[in-house]
Structures are given as C-alpha cells and as structure tokens.
Image: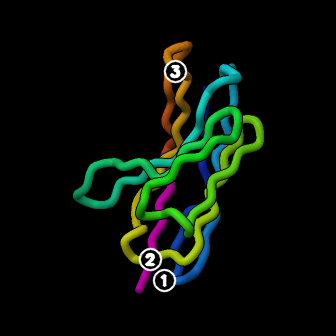
C-alpha cells in the first residue's frame, strides 16, 4: 500500500489550502483515513479522521475551519482561515484496525505566514 499526499505549500494567514492523499494497493474496505500534523519541536497530532462510512472527527483547534472528505481511498482536507499555528508537516494516515498494517504518507509541508 502507498499513500501519496499532495497539496502543501506557502499561504498567507486567512487563506485556504487543500491537501489530498490517494491510497493505492490492497486496502481493507473498513479502513479509516485521516490527517495528522507535526510542527517543529512538537509531537505529531491528530487533525481529522474519516471512517469508511463517512463519520468524521476533528481536533478542537481545526473544527469549523477544516473539512475532511473521502472518495473511496482518496482523502481530502480542505483548510480554510489558516493561521500561523497551522504551520506543520501534514501526514496522511491509513488505519486498518488490525486487519492489516497501518500506513503513513510521506508528509507535505504547509507554511502559513502571518
């Protein structure tokens, strides 16, 4: 299985950015997908997840600003009203709930300048 993430970049505070992650290979249908991020000097943290049935979960810090969606094994993160504290490397994640390995994408850098 490979997770190919794209869409990072440099934006001004208040602007929007879209991240996308395509999962390729043999993926269990019940797998959840999501996004995590790691800012410099900080631990990796959950941003948002979405189940195979479309149930979503967000970190409090991004609720009402970010939207996660999914089409089969492609997950998209729409990020609006970006803040400088959103600057981080964003990682796509695949959770197969023990039926198979979990996977991480390669990470994509989001930089928000204030």
Q: Which residue is mark 3?
A: 97
Q: Main secondary structure of the magenta part?
A: strand
Q: Are marks 3 and 2 in contact (CB under 8 Å)?
A: no
Locate residue 113: give its quadrant: bottom left
Which quadrant: the C terminus? Answer: bottom left
1 or 2: tag closer to the N-terminus: 1
From mark 1 to mark 2, how far is it between C-alphas? 5 Å
User: How many neighbours does mark 3 have within 10 angstroms: few (below 14), some (14-19), or many (20 or more)?
Assistant: few
From mark 1 to mark 3, how far is it between C-alphas? 36 Å
Does the magenta portion include 113? yes
Residue placed at 44% from the left, 55% from the top? Answer: 59
Note whether 4 is above or below 84 in the view shown. Answer: above
Q: Residue 4 location in percent, x, y?
A: 62, 42
3 or 2: tag closer to the N-terminus: 2
Which quadrant: the N terminus? Answer: top right
Q: Residue 86 location in percent, x, y?
A: 42, 68
1 or 3: tag closer to the N-terminus: 1
Magenta stretch in the rendered image: 107-114
Locate residue 29: give its quadrant: top right
Residue placed at 28% from the left, 60% from the top? Answer: 40
The numbered disc on residue 13 is: 1
Q: Are marks 1 and 2 in contact (CB under 8 Å)?
A: yes
Residue that protrudes farthest toward the bottom in the picture: 114
Residue placed at 42% from the left, 48% from the top? Answer: 46
Give the camera-side residue of 97 and 13. Answer: 97
Where disc 2 sits, the SS reads loop
Residue that protrudes farthest toward the right in the picture: 71
The numbered disc on residue 83 is: 2
Left or right: 54 in relation to 113: right
């Amino acid at each position: 299985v490979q997770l190919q993430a794209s869409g990072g970049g440099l934006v001004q505070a208040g602007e929007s950015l879209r991240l996308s992650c395509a999962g390729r290979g043999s993926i269990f249908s019940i797998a959840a997908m999501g996004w995590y991020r790691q800012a410099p000097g900080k631990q990796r943290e959950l941003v948002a997840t979405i189940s195979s049935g479309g149930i979503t979960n967000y970190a409090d810090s991004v609720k009402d600003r970010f939207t996660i969606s999914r089409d089969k094994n492609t997950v998209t993160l729409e990020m609006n009203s970006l803040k400088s504290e959103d600057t981080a490397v964003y990682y796509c994640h695949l959770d197969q709930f023990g039926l198979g390995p979990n996977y991480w994408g390669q990470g994509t850098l989001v930089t928000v300048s204030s």
